[in-house]
Image (spheres, helix red, strand yellow):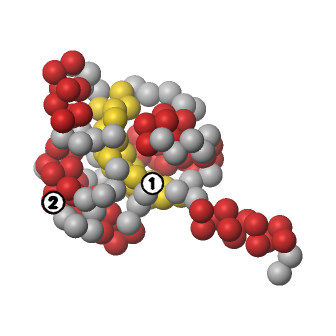
């Protein structure tokens, strides 16, 4: 095996896996594409809280970007279920939200999320925001 191929395989193994959860397909795809193209991370998506929990258990992502306002199981309930499951409790969660009232931001912080990315967000900056919020210092 040549060195370049080995290096590419090593990089693929080292790439972070991010689970992007949002009920809006367009947002999921924009975020996923930006994380893959700009940060060279792997990204998977979920359209609901229930799907997010299932994928978090099966795929064990390095982080979850979670929309707060979703029909059915919202982001707060999804976070609670993720935190109560030993298989997913240690996965860092960043909320994607349009809710930016100071009291809501304080509530989110007390819930144990790693941070907030406010909608509308800059797609070209989102990977750097995730990196900064999680202290990965990769980008």
> Cα distance, mark 2 to mark 1?
20 Å
Q: Which residue is located at x 79 percent, y 71 percent? A: 5
Are circles 2 and 1 on residues that touch, CB within 8 Å?
Answer: no
Residue corresponding to mark 2: 84
| Quadrant that contains the N terminus | bottom right
Which element carries disc 1, helix, strand or loop? strand
Residue 67, position as x, y percentages in the image = 29, 41
Q: Which residue is located at x 16 percent, y 31 percent? A: 107
Left or right: residue 130 versus residue 9 is: left
Task: Look at the picture and state if 5 lies above or below 89.
Answer: below
Bin the neighbour count of mark 2 within 10 Å (Cα to Cα): few under 14, some 14-19, many 20 and up: few
Can see residue 34?
Answer: no
Q: Which residue is located at x 30 percent, y 53 percent? A: 47
Q: Closest to the observer: 52 or 92?
A: 92
Residue corresponding to mark 1: 18
Which element carries disc 2, helix, strand or loop? helix
Residue 72, position as x, y percentages in the image = 13, 49
Task: Look at the picture and state if 124 lies above or below 50.
Answer: above
Res. 2 image quadrant: bottom right
């Amino acid at each position: 095996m040549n060195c370049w191929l080995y290096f590419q395989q090593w990089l693929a193994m080292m790439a972070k896996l991010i689970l992007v959860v949002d009920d809006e397909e367009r947002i999921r795809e924009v975020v996923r594409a930006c994380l893959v193209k700009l940060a060279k991370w792997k990204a998977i998506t979920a359209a609901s809280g229930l799907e997010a929990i299932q994928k978090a258990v099966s795929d064990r992502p390095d982080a979850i970007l979670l929309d707060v306002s979703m029909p059915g199981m919202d982001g707060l309930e999804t976070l609670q279920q993720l935190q109560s499951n030993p298989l997913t409790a240690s996965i860092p969660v960043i909320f994607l939200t349009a809710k930016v009232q100071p009291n809501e931001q304080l509530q989110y912080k007390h819930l144990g999320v790693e941070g907030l990315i406010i909608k509308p967000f800059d797609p070209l900056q989102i990977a750097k925001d995730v990196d900064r919020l999680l202290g990965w210092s990769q980008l």
